[in-house]
Image (cartoon, rainbow, N blue to C red):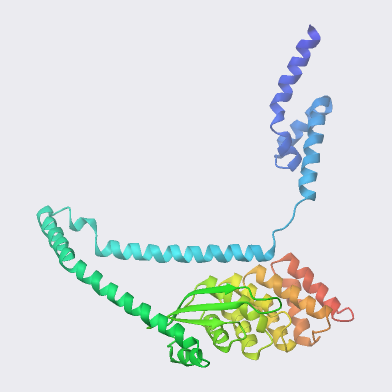
Amino acid sequence: MQQEQQDKMAAEICKGFEEKWTLFAAGELDASEIAEMKSHLVECERCNETLAQENALVALLSSNRTEPDAALLAGCRASLEDALDREEEHGWVRRAVGALLPTSWISPAPAWSAALLLLIGFSVGMLGPRLLQHRAANTAQTGVNTQNASMEDGTPNGSATRLSSIDMHTAQVAGINVSPSAENEPPQVEVRLNAQQPFTVQGTVNNDDVKSVLMYILRNNQRFDADSRMNAVELLRARNKDADVRSTLCQTVHTDHNAAVRLKALEALDGAEPQDIIQQTLLDALVDDQNPGVRVEAINALRAMAAKGQVESDDHLLSVLRDRMHKDPSTYIRLQSAAAIQDLGPRQKF
C-alpha cells in the first residue's frame, strides 16, 4: 500500500514535467528550467525514457529536413506580389468611388435624395433599352469582322497583311491557346488579339507572325499579364537560337518585373548561342536580381556551362564569382560560386 502511494506521488511529480520534455529536447527552455529538469532526471527513470523518445524524434525531423525548390519559392513570391498589386489597385478604385459618392450626400437631405434617385431611375428606363440595342448591333458587326479576318488568314499572305495593319500599341492579348502537334513537330499556337477589329494569329512558333506577337508581349511586359508572358517565354524557347528571340529572352531576364517570368526566361536560354551573350546575362542576373530563386538558377546555369567547357574564364567572371562567394545572402549561392571558381581552372587565391 505504501509503495502504491509512493508511485502515485512520483507520477504526480512527473506530470508537471511531461509538457516540458519536448521543449527541453529542442533547447527552448531558459537556464533555470533546464537546471530543474536535469535535477529531476537524476532520480527519475521514467522521465529519462520520455526524454530519450523526444531526442529521437528531434533527430529524425532534423535528418529529413529538405529545403523547398528555388523555382517554387520564386513562383510563390511572384504570385504574392501580383496579388498584392491587384489588391492595391482595387483599393484605389474603391477609395476613388467613395470620394465621389460619399453616403453623407444622401442622409442629410432625404427629400432631395429621393428626387435624385427618381431622376436616375427615369433616365435608366428611357436610355437603357436604346443602349442595349446599339451594343447588340455593334456585337453583330464585330462578329462579321472577326469571321472575315479568319477567312483572310486562309490566303497565303493574308496573316502577314492583317498583322502589319494592327496597331500593336493599342492591341490587347485576349488569350493564347496551345495545341499539341504530331511527334517531333512544334505545337500549334493561337493568339487572339483585341484591337479595333478582333484578330487571331495562328501557326507554330516557326511562323514569323506568331514569333513577332510573342516577342512583342515580352518586350512590353508592363502591358500584358504574367500568364501571357510565361506562355510567350515557354513557346519561344524552341527558337532560342534565333538572334531576335535570344535578344528578347535576355531583355526579359533583365527587365521583367515578375520573378517567375525572369526565372522561366533564364531556363529558356539553355542551349542558346553565342555563349558569351548568355554568360553575360547569367552574370548580370547573379549580381543584380533581388530574387534568390533567379540567382540560384543563374549560378546553376553557369556551373552547367562550365562543365561543358562553354565558359571563358576571364578576370571579369572570376571577379563576379568571388564577389558572390563573399557577399551573396544565400549560403547556397556562396558555396556554388566558390565551387565554380574551382571548376574553371587551377585553384584561385580568394
Q: Residue furthest right?
A: 346
13 or 189: nearer the eye?
189
Quarter of the image where the N terminus is located: top right
Q: Residue at x 74, y 76 (%)?
A: 301
Q: Residue 27 location in percent, x, y?
A: 74, 42
Where residue 338 sits, quadrant-wise, is bottom right
Q: Residue 52 location in percent, x, y?
A: 82, 35
Where residue 251 sits, quadrant-wise, is bottom right
116 or 184: nearer the eye?
184
Q: Can residue 208 be seen in this snapshot?
A: yes
Image position of 74 (left or right of 315) = left
Would you place residue 340 above or below residue 21 in this image?
below
60 or 233: nearer the eye?
233
86 or 328: nearer the eye?
86
Q: Residue at x 9, y 54 (%)?
A: 111
Q: Residue 38 location in percent, x, y?
A: 79, 32
Quarter of the image where the C terminus is located: bottom right
Would you place residue 101 above or below residue 220 in this image?
above
Figure disc tally: 0
Would you place residue 20 above or below residue 315 in this image?
above
Where residue 71 sits, quadrant-wise, is bottom right
Image position of 123 (left or right of 248) = left
Q: Can residue 195 be seen in this snapshot?
A: no
Q: Residue at x 57, y 80 (%)?
A: 255
